[in-house]
């Protein structure tokens, strides 16, 4: 069975994210919640649509599902979608008291081209910001959910002299490489995992794929 749900006033819908018994609609001009009647699961014959916020999302790539919380980039702030202790949904600006100036200095294009990921092992959200003029990810903004602190990183200044980062992925603590053409021994892989970075570095006229991680205790 199929059908349509009309969300009055919503335009430029970026992403749909489940949050508990709700379906969160993240659009360019605001946030909506679809839920069932009497706080139950919504279905085609029984649902309600509530507008939660007028603070819209710049792009779906900035939306991060962190389990019971959703984060996204707006034009003027980074926002968190989360139910309060009474179960009511709220949208909160998490940049105003911490990195308002830092975020304001980012261009709209850089914000729109940012890519967010959630590292559930360190309980952090990472946003990589793309520098369109130089065509690589130039900065990363990391947010610690427990400490509610931001960690800004500059990843590189010149693509001609630095490695080019193009993303993150979940990997074992140690990446094993064996003889060319053979797979690493499954028994040699550790059970714990963490987020690693993947990128390309230049060596003479050749490009080489690399995997890495980095750490900085400073935060703002």
Image (tube, rainbow, N blue to C red):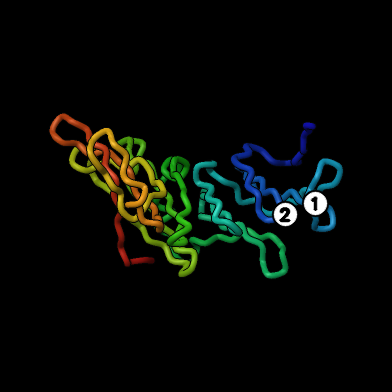
Badge 1 crowding class, 10 Å Cα cut-off, few under 14, some 14 to 19, many 20 or more, is some
User: Label 1, on which residue?
Assistant: 36
Which label sits on residue 21? 2
Instruction: Tell me the SS state at disc 1.
Output: loop
Q: Quadrant of residue 12?
A: top right
Q: In the rendered image of this protein, does residue 128 appear above or below residue 148?
A: above
- In the drawing, does residue 122 fall left or right of residue 23? left
Considering the numbered disc 2 on the image, is that residue within a helix, a strand or a loop?
loop
Using the image as rendered, state which of residue 51 and residue 64 is in the foreground. 64
* Separation (CA) of disc 2 from disc 1: 8 Å
Give the x, y percent position of residue 21: 72, 54
Quadrant of the image containing the N terminus: top right
Q: Residue at x 36, y 58 (%)?
A: 152
Number of dots carrying numbers: 2
Residue shown at 44% from the left, 40% from the top = 113
In this picture, residue 49 sits left or right of residue 193? right
Query: 98 or 5: which is nearer to us?
Result: 5
Q: Are marks 2 and 1 in contact (CB under 8 Å)?
A: yes
Tell me the residue at 69%/48% (across/down): 23
């Amino acid at each position: 069975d199929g059908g349509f749900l009309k969300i009055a006033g919503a335009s430029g819908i970026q992403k749909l994210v489940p949050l508990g018994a709700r379906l969160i609609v993240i659009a360019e001009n605001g946030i909506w919640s679809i839920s069932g009647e009497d706080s139950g699961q919504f279905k085609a014959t029984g649902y309600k649509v509530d507008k939660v916020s007028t603070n819209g999302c710049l792009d779906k790539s900035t939306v991060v599902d962190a389990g019971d919380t959703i984060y996204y980039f707006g034009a003027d702030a980074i926002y968190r979608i989360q139910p309060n202790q009474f179960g009511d949904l709220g949208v909160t600006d998490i940049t105003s008291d911490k990195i308002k100036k830092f975020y304001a200095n980012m261009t709209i294009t850089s914000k729109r081209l940012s890519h967010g990921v959630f590292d559930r092992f360190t309980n952090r959200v990472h946003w990589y910001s793309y520098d369109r003029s130089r065509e690589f990810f130039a900065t990363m903004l990391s947010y610690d959910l427990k400490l509610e602190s931001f960690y800004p990183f500059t990843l590189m200044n010149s693509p001609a002299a630095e490695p080019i980062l193009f993303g993150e992925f979940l990997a074992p603590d140690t990446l094993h490489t064996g003889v060319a053409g053979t797979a690493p021994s499954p028994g040699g892989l550790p059970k714990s995992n963490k987020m690693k970075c993947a990128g390309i570095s230049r060596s003479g006229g050749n490009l080489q794929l690399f995997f890495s991680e980095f750490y900085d205790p400073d935060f703002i």
